[in-house]
Image (cartoon, coloured by chain):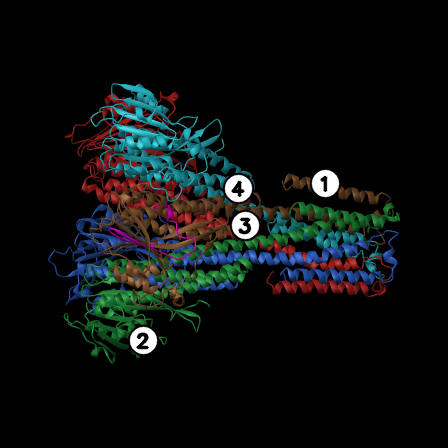
Chain colours: A blue, B red, C green, D cyan, E brown
């Protein structure tokens, strides 16, 4: 299976000088693209799923609402909607800017009324043998999570979480929004492990090919593989920091009960990072082996050339010698001369071969 | 688009042993160069823009002045003016030394009465396909910012900020000098992203060229590219530290409200730095691929040489053999001798080719 | 003795989206595989060893039980059993997930009622000349340790600990579960030293071979050796952190008396890590020497070729010259011509050899 | 201008086992070498300069003396004098050991009654195109600085400081010994910038030469340049730490007023270090370019050889063929045979050239 | 002088599973080897030196004993003696384990009643041109130091310390066991500087040889040199940490008065480490120069080959051409043909040489 990184679109940097909170970075031509909003509302005993038509229909839960609301917004290209949401939930303007920017580095911000968190969702699509890297953002309130995703056909990775909510499996329904957040992050990180398996398999293939049958084409493949790893690391590395900050969070959003779970996600993230580093280390070893195999083959090519030249050049000299047309060349008139020359040639050839065998060139 | 770094002038190191506060490091011949001073004074309701003729006309706002003053000084080569400003605003002598030094490392100093901060403003001029790196310094008081720039024709990057002030867009007019500072820093960092895009495009071109058609000239280009990246990193890297210090500032100049915005600028700076590091990483991978492609082509050149030699040297020996002039060479008188020799030659050639094909040299 | 890393089975990543505590990652077909449970119960005066038939027969010691219980579970592939144990001892669901995952990074978690710790047990089997890397997990209560191991034929490394318990050697019988934990960790780390000896011997062999008789095959061996070192480091490195955390433990599980012992294990772990790093450093030096020896041999091959060509090409020209069939070639009719040509040839050959000797090519 | 590092003398390590405070490390034969002592005593209103004949004539200022004393000792090879000074000012024995050792790493020690500080004074002598690295030590009391320098003909770098004291420029005369210390350190660091300019110029020359006309001799030059940079870094790097410690000094020797000035020196030191690191980075890029240019030229040499061989070897075979002396070679009797052969030869040559052009070898 | 590392014996790892305090790691066959115990007991006024026959005769000084006892144990292979000492002085079992292990990493442990510290004593034996690395351990009580050394013929490095004690030089006799400890550590570190001088001299020789006359044998020497440096660094690096911990010691063993002296030892250790790092850095530069000189010489070899081939191959073709036996070759009958051919050959040769000179190959 081949690993490709499909970027959604070329990154458009923010227009310099925009005031913070002004949303740019997306094409206003398809502003018409309307984000889909879906809601899952659950308590320990009840669960309700529905589509929400517009931002106006979204609910701001009161502080003493015992239910947990999870709004999932598919599509972050509609600035109007985003601004409406910003207003409704009284979000910081920078927060929405980060949501709208597709190339945001994973980060966690601790605002007065909410937590904000972005991560990269990396998924493998087995059909097209490619990898999707999408950005997911979470805004976390006491009993509310709003998740923002880029719109795409394949859907998201959170279906198992939804299923568990529906079936009331595990303790998700009994816990608050912090546990839901953990659960979603956990799913994202679990997908990193799937990618790690692809990457590991690929490493094994490359390793085997390079050690048995090295070729320059494969070096280019290694180069592309390394690039993917650089990309992966850039996506995963900051998540580590994010989770550390989340665990140390002082704004009381994350309860003590959820912290061991976050530590677990942290451990997984570190494991992914270490694996990426190990693979990079191994790859550079493979490149070393390849380069030495190239110079080694060069060596053996040169040896063949040298052996051939060293044998035949003296022979050519001898035949040239007796091809000269001097009047007075007594050997030419010796009836055995020809056979002696052939004998000498054979001796030279054999002698050279013995010499090369001693020098371990054969 | 080509990336060039245009240095304004050769860096002149400070004459050793000057007392701190003595301003050197610029050419006194064009001391006549007069810096242009412009003022923007705004409160939430009013805004006034004007040119200021001389330092004497600059205002020292009182502590209870509700307006924010932004003096922008274009040109830092006139020591008299700088000394006048130093006196007027009671600035630390070292501060003015840093303002005047064009090769200052980005830094932030926390003086008793004010904050001092320098950064590199990196801009791309699309017309000349080059990049300008200029130094900007900010002196920040409670309700006053003095910004110092090098004088040049293209102006500065702060026009969008001025526009927003005029149009009262965003909350700039409602906030103090700290928000203005943030807003100016944000604009500078936003421009780094523009540069990053150039750099990214350049990387892509180099990558494509190197993988499809490697040449030594392109390696020199990579070398120059790496040099530019080293320069970029040196300009951006310290800014990270500067903003961390700014956020932790204890002299009460930066209000709590502005800190999340600074964190945002910080995140952007880190992102730029990480991108530069990734590109360096990728570049070294490209160099590896290039070097291996060179030794690979060498390999294939050597193979051609060896194949040719290995085939024709034995043949040359045979023809040489029957070109000898011995009296007694029975084969020469065999009427089929010539055809046999040709046959043997063909056999040797074919045999060699088969041998090379088996060795996968063909 | 050859060093091989035998992985038990291919790592199966956790199915994404499972709720935490849901145990996956093993093959449900051999779910029938029943883990063996054995108990050692000891106090200073008494010791009792027995097999435990099922989880139901396991005892939850009361807080004032003066005995120490050590349950050892061989086999972590039976989810039912694990869940029973989880329930019985009121363990955190994440804990059991980590026990069941065979590719867990060494870690230490501090739960409310217990400590959890995993480490890699690396053993050398002298018979098969291979190395086993197994995961061991410990759940530590006040007077109870449950250790989880993968099931295998060779047994575990803890027999000496059991023997000491039986013979009441050292102070193990007088101390609590924390000292038992230390003692088990110490045994694991002592085995790292055994591996380090293998690794050191191997390095010495590789070094000697590479310096005396370098070959490309050996470079592949070095590559594999480096890979093993990367694996070793990955297994040992996190243990360092684990023990630091253990020593700083605040949940009162580790008594002050045991901490110096843990510091000792820490020192050993650091020593193993430093040795691995040194070996990596030395290996890269060997690779340098090898690569330079390759290019050096190439050099000497090229010299032979060049010497041969440089001597015989001019000679071939001369013989060719007098093999031409021009009517008017006065030298050909000179009776000494042939001898003069031979003399010239000898002069050229000797002159060339002298030249090469001066250039230190011979 | 060429950069050379002139070491005063070979470093003699301290004789092991000397008791601390015993002064070794210099040649007792020229013990007669007498250090020159000069004094500058100043207050805001007065200044007095004089030579001091012997240590006995040195003054120990009382705590309430409003004047600042600066004793400068030229020459640290006379142990008797040093011991007299040690006694007179009640200095720690280790302090004098450090003063006498010429190869001391820059450091700062905070003794009960005084501060001790050593730094490297690096100066360029334009006449001899070389660089001097000398050690300067400072012992700082409340109103007294004793500076120790190695004796040499060119004098020291502190003349501008003396001049400023004399002319009462800046605030040196108004401030205490801490500001004087800053002022001297600042002068030392300012000289680093001068060296950096030399180094930068040298880099530019090397870069230009290597890119336009690479040669192995220049690689040796780069190697020597890198060595000098290693030396420079070793001299400057610890100074950074020294100044940090100085700023954090708790023994009340450094007043709050002077600390911003120290921060400034710190910034300059960091800038020097970063520049050295950048240059090292750039140099390794140049080496890469050089190495690839070497293998590239090798490539082009090989191509010429291969092209020549590939064209002329088949031709030589053909001519050899028709130089054979078989009785029955019908082509030889064909009147156009010769012209056909020449035609064939031309075809082969042209064909080969076309082939190589297609392969882009021409 | 050549640098060799003579290991006393092959490291035997501790038998896994031994209880802590059980002493293994040495050969029980020569258990008979009796350690020599010598005592120096001193106060400011008195000093007594004697041999102690057995552990039973060793004294445990009372807390108010004003004398300082220094027991030196030569030989750590007798477990019985070690256990007797352990019992007598109530030492922690792990402590004795560390004393007995010959491959202990330098470390410092802070036990309740004493400090424990091990370091590597590296000495050069000028006669045999080799280096000894031995382990020394110190157990430090209020007025007692027990030092453990490996037994050997050359004795130890502490003779100057003993001499100073005897002659009452310096303040050793006036101070407690902490100053004695410092004094012994200082002597050990002073010996590192001696080694550094050897190493520095060796570097200079290698550098000179490599730059003037590079050879593959010398690369192996560099490799061995690097290995020695790795070993040196491993021995010295942890000592830095040890001294930091010693200085921060909280168990009141180290008095405030001694701490500046420890700081001095710390500075020396850092200097040794930095020197080792610099040498490694320089060595890698030398290897670069060597490798490029190899490929450079290859280049020049190839050029000779190519020049010779390029000149003589066309000439050989021409002579071959006129050696053909065609009936109709008009040039052959031209009386000047031969001279024309010779002229053409000369022209080709000269033309080629001019061409190569233009290409700067000559």
Q: Is residue C84 toward the left or the right of residue C309 in the image? A: left
Q: Nearer the viewer, mark 3 or mark 4?
A: 3
Query: Circle 1 sits on which residue?
Result: E350
Labels 3 and 1 touching (C-beta < 8 A): no
Q: What percent of the width, then of the height, locates residue A165?
A: 21, 66
Q: What percent of the width, then of the height, locates residue B21?
A: 30, 26
Q: Quadrant of residue B101?
A: top left
Q: What percent of the width, then of the height, locates residue B88?
A: 23, 24
Q: Which chain carries label 4?
A: D
The answer to whether D231 is drawn above or below residue C304 in the figure is above
Residue E139 inside the magenta-drawn segment: yes
* Mark 3 or mark 1: whose residue is earlier in sequence: 3
Query: Circle 2 sits on which residue?
Result: C28
Q: Can residue E269 be seen in this view?
A: no
Query: Circle 3 sits on which residue?
Result: E218
Q: Which chain carries label 1?
A: E
| Marks 4 and 2, how far apart at CA | 64 Å
What SS does tag 1 mark? Answer: helix
Viewer-proximal residue among B180 and B232: B232
Q: Is residue C359 toward the left or the right of residue E109 in the image? A: right
Q: Which chain carries label 2?
A: C
Residue D219, disc: 4
Mark 2: few, some, or many residues within 10 Å (few <14, many ≥20)?
few
Q: Is residue C325 visible?
A: yes
Mark 4: few, some, or many residues within 10 Å (few <14, many ≥20)?
many
Labels 4 and 1 touching (C-beta < 8 A): no
Q: How many labels does the image show?
A: 4
Q: Give the range drawn in magenta.
A: E137-161
| Marks 3 and 1, how far apart at CA | 41 Å
């Amino acid at each position: 299976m081949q690993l490709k990184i499909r970027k959604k679109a070329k990154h458009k940097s923010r227009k310099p000088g925009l005031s913070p909170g002004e949303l740019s970075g997306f094409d206003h031509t398809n502003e018409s693209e309307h984000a889909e909003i879906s809601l899952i509302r659950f308590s320990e005993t009840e669960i309700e799923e529905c589509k929400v038509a517009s931002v106006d229909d979204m609910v701001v839960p009161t502080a003493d609402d015992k239910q947990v609301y999870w709004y999932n917004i598919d599509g972050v290209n509609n600035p109007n909607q985003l601004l409406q949401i910003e207003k409704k939930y009284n979000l910081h303007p920078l927060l929405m800017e980060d949501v709208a920017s597709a190339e945001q580095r994973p980060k966690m911000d601790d605002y007065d009324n909410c937590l904000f968190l972005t991560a990269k969702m990396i998924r493998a699509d087995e059909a097209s043998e490619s990898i999707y890297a999408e950005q997911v953002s979470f805004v976390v309130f006491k009993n509310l999570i709003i998740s923002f995703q880029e719109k795409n056909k394949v859907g998201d990775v959170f279906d198992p979480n939804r299923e568990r909510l529906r079936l009331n499996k595990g303790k998700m329904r009994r816990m608050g929004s912090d546990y839901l957040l953990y659960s979603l992050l956990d799913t994202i990180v679990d997908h990193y492990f799937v990618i790690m398996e692809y990457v590991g398999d690929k490493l094994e293939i490359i390793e085997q090919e390079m050690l048995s049958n090295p070729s320059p084409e494969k070096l280019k493949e290694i180069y592309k593989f390394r690039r993917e790893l650089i990309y992966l690391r850039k996506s995963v590395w900051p998540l580590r920091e994010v989770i550390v900050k989340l665990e140390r969070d002082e704004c009381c959003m994350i309860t003590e009960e959820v912290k061991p779970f976050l530590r677990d996600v942290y451990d997984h993230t570190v494991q992914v990072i270490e694996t990426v580093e190990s693979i990079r280390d191994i790859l550079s070893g493979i490149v070393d082996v390849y380069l030495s195999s190239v110079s080694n083959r060069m060596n053996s090519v040169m040896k063949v050339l040298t052996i051939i030249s060293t044998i035949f050049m003296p022979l050519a000299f001898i035949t040239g010698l007796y091809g000269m047309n001097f009047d007075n060349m007594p050997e030419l008139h010796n009836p055995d001369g020809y056979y002696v020359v052939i004998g000498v040639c054979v001796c030279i050839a054999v002698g050279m071969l013995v010499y090369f065998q001693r020098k371990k060139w054969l």
